[in-house]
């Protein structure tokens, strides 16, 4: 039984992946969420070391140079996201499976690195109209950022075939149950 396993969730922003991940985390499986590092500023009540590790651009680049990241991505110009090696070791030391919420490029890279030890799940929305609606409701982006995110989502969707499974999040409850069934099987391997 190899405990150094991971479950990777990737999806365009607004697809509901955070909700699905939180549903899984509350189910009592031996899994733990990997906290990513980012150069973006905290939103709302976000705290360092809880939602993300918040680094300045200089500090992030220094950590890249030091080889401290398992994977990282410059998602937008000077807006980096990444997974610290130390974060993975921390979770694996507890004998738990890591749960990642990463962008599509990061998800593909982790799957390539870990192969059978990784379960890569792509969360898909029924339509781009629905994505737009959800992002507008969230109201965290300017109109320009909203268009950027939708363009990125259209691009990312082309890579969904590279994931082990695609979950269509049309009805959230169904998507949560489908995800749980797949994760439960993977953890038994």
Image (tube, grey):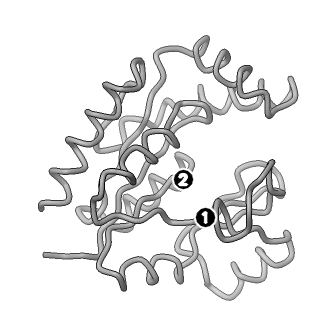
Q: Residue at x 78, y 82 (%)?
A: 62
Q: Quadrant of residue 42?
A: bottom right
Left or right of residue 147: residue 164: left
The circle drawn on residue 36 is 1
Q: Quadrant of residue 160?
A: top left
Residue 144: horizontal and vertical position, in percent? 86, 27
- The C terminus lies in quadrant: bottom left
Residue 170: horizontal and vertical position, in percent? 42, 18
Secondary structure at numbered mark 1: strand
Q: Residue at x 82, y 52 (%)?
A: 77
The circle drawn on residue 111 is none
Q: Are marks 2 and 1 in contact (CB under 8 Å)?
A: yes
The vertical placement of 177 against 29, above or below, is above
The vertical placement of 167 against 36, above or below, is above
Q: Of the residues under marks 2 and 1, which one precedes in the sequence?
A: 1
Residue 94: horizontal and vertical position, in percent? 35, 82
Query: Which residue is labeled 2 in the image?
Result: 102
Q: Residue at x 41, y 54 (%)?
A: 8
Q: Real-space Cα distance between discs 2 and 1?
A: 8 Å
Q: Residue at x 85, y 71 (%)?
A: 56
- The N terminus lies in quadrant: bottom left
Left or right of residue 18: residue 160: left
């Amino acid at each position: 039984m190899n405990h150094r396993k991971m479950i990777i969730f990737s999806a365009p922003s607004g697809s509901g992946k955070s909700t699905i991940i939180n549903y899984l985390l509350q189910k009592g499986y031996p899994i733990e969420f990997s906290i990513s590092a980012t150069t973006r500023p905290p939103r709302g009540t976000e705290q360092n070391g809880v939602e993300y590790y918040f680094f300045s651009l200089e500090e992030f680049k220094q950590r890249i140079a030091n080889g401290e990241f398992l994977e990282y991505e410059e998602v937008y110009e000077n807006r980096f996201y990444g997974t610290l090696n130390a974060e993975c070791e921390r979770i694996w030391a507890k004998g738990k499976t890591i749960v990642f919420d990463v962008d599509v490029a990061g998800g593909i890279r982790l799957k390539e690195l870990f192969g059978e030890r990784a379960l890569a799940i792509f969360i898909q929305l029924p339509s781009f109209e629905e994505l737009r609606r959800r992002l507008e409701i969230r109201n965290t982006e300017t109109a320009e950022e909203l268009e950027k995110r939708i363009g990125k989502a259209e691009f990312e969707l082309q890579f969904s075939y590279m994931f082990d499974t695609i979950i269509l999040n049309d009805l959230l409850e169904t998507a949560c149950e489908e995800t749980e069934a797949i994760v439960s099987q993977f953890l038994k391997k």
